[in-house]
Image (tube, grey):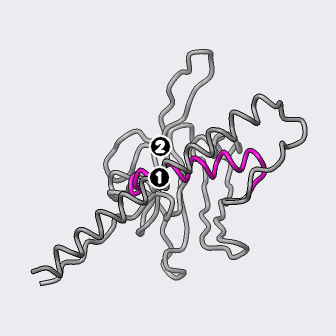
Amino acid sequence: MISIAMAKLTVEECLGLDVNWLNRQGMLRPGTSSTVRWYRGKEEVGSIRVRALSNAVIEFSYLFDRRELICYEVGLTWTPCHFGGQRPWFICPGCGKRVGKLYAPGKYFLCRHCYDLTYQSQRESRGDRLLRRARKLRGKLGLKPWEPIVEKPPRMHWKTFLRLREEILWLELEALKEIHREIDRLAKRVDKLFSK
């Protein structure tokens, strides 16, 4: 019997709403009505109308599968910040938890716990995490992955450049070692399968 393990969806694969972003855009002020749109490249993949009914309630309305109009209210709560002001939170319509982000891999915007979503980084092996960190540092130097580190970017201190270069080289070397170990593990599994 063959079993197929289905990977969980990640938050990065879903449309998401961040309550702090909405607040910074002024979309949580009572009486405001705004549209949030998502794009992949130049193609619009989704949009939602957000209407602030009060400080404690906002309304979402959008088309699901481009044909069914969905409209419901989502609660808000506010907590004081240490240096003044307040921070908004969604009250998840699915479980009632206080959360900063809601996601819609399905019909409704709910928290990641309701949809059992994970983060992309939780799927990554140690080698993948090392390479991701190296790519991020290469971006600071204005480089694409695997471009040689030849010259210091303008206006960057030499000490910073040398530290970043050293860290990138170490990360990539460790990632290659990890990939080598993974290949060895897979080779042993294949040998074991075919030696039976």
Q: Which residues are magenta?
A: 122-143
Q: Residue at x 61, y 61 (%)?
A: 49
Q: Amino acid at mark 2?
A: Phe
Report, in whole angstroms, how far the alpha carbon at label 1 lies from the one at label 2: 8 Å
Comes first in the chain, label 1 or label 2 = 2
Residue identified by numbered label 1: 102
Q: Are marks 1 and 2 in contact (CB under 8 Å)?
A: yes
Q: Amino acid at mark 1?
A: Leu
106 displayed left or right of 83? left
Q: Residue at x 41, y 60 (%)?
A: 180
Name the front one of labels 1 and 2: 1
Locate residue 32, reporting x and y percent.
68, 48
The image quarter containing residue 192 is bottom left
How would you rate the neighbour count of disc 1 (Cα within 10 Å): few for under 14, some for 14-19, many for 20 or more?
many
Residue identified by numbered label 2: 90
> Magenta region, mostly helix, strand or loop?
helix
Locate residue 154, reporting x and y percent.
90, 41
Residue placed furthest toward the right: 154
The image quarter containing residue 188 is bottom left
Q: Which sits in the foreground, 54 or 99?
A: 99
Dot 1 falls on a residue whose secondary structure is strand
From the image, which quarter does the N terminus lie in? bottom left
Q: Residue at x 40, y 48 (%)?
A: 92
Locate residue 135, reporting x and y percent.
63, 52
